[in-house]
Image (tube, rainbow, N blue to C red):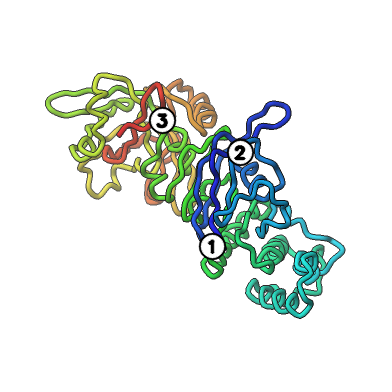
Amino acid sequence: MAGIEYRGLTKRFADGTVAVTELDLEIQDGEFVVLVGPSGSGKTTVLRMTAGLEDPTSGEIAIGGMRVNEIPPMDRNIAMVFQNYALYPHMSVYDNMAFGLKLHKVKKDVIRQRVESTAKMLAIDELLKRKPSQLSGGQRQRVAMGRAIVREPDAFLMDEPLSNLDAKLRVEMRAYVVLLHQELGTTTVYVTHDQTEAMTMGDRVAVMRGGLLEQCDIPRRLYEHPVNMFVGTFIGSPAMNLVRSRLVAENGSVHVDVGEATLRLPQSVLAERRGLQERVGYDVIVGIRPEDIEDAALVASPNGHATLDVKVALAESTGAEVIAYFPIKAESVGGPEQERRELIARQVGADETTLTARLNPRTRAEAGAPLRVAIDASRLHFFDAKSERSIW
């Protein structure tokens, strides 16, 4: 096993497209790091350069402390798991798993021992004689992982390995991969566009956009302390609500208006985020996570909450929660789900901002009905209106 380090890693393609820019990131030995971001963010290019399938334009890749830029892919002692499984259809499961070892001229008895023990670990030992066409999607993915595991590599590189599975199987395999990593302890770099997958799997999560690393941290800190508006809205589902407002000091307190609700900031928030005091009187972007908006009738301790009377435009029950949408009189800023929110606003004849809330399943929120909601002022996020950086 070995750690992986990227030093000033840059990739510029022949047509001038810059896929990755000056990436500096150190992955510890045995760590599970997820690269996440929208399409075109550069995450897969980073993985391909690590594997040796793409050459960096500049910068260095080190595995186990050794620079590998000039080392051929097959000599880097890393194993890659692809989105499309990449199994040989004419080979049995056994031969698919053994193929890489045969290329490296490993002895037959060692190959058999590794394949059989790995197959047992992955619960596919009864499938070794079957062909890929006789397997389910989950079984094929386990075979692909088995092929990587038998090589006993220094690191695993996984490129959206679960994206072809249905929702239920994807959740099951997600847990399986995490447990497998805990058992093997092999350094793993995992690429996905699914932020839920990233947050539930990674020891750390690296958020990329346009070839740049925006933030890399443990999942909880990414969620609670995003460095900018992009990370704040990308992490979390449904996405964070964004509203333009102004910080106002009045009668010894500081507040922001969100629609017709005045949110007075607790002293604890002002003490923690000293930068807010410097922006009193200026426009800011207020971020409100949907889970920090609740049916006021179901809030046990209303202290620190501001209430707002709204008319629900749409209520979607999942059983465990109700996702509610309602327009308010405020200036929107955009964000990942803005098109959907604007569509809902037009459908109900409103031209205001639409907020999204994750409500307790006991709520009586219904489309077209009035509702009083409570917004937790202690959980607000604030971003600079120009730079979109978080205010602390």
Q: Estimate how packed mark 3 is, as few (under 14), some (14 to 19) or many (20 or more) residues with alpha carbons within 10 Å.
A: many
User: Which residue in the protein does label 2 denote?
Assistant: 42
Residue assigned mark 1: 178
Where residue 308 sits: x, y (%)? 30, 32
First in residue order: circle 1 vs circle 2: 2
Q: Nearer the viewer, mark 1 or mark 2?
A: 2
**Upstream in sequence: badge 1 or badge 3:** 1
Name the mark on residue 242: 3
Quick check: 206 above or below 30?
above
Give me the residue at 75% from left, 75% from top: 111
Marks 1/3: CA distance? Answer: 33 Å
Under mark 3, the amino acid is Leu
Element at badge 1? helix
Q: Secondary structure at mark 2?
A: loop
Which one is in front in this view, the residue at disc 3 or the one at disc 2? 2
Q: Dot 2, crowdedness within 10 Å: few (<14), some or many (≥20)?
A: many
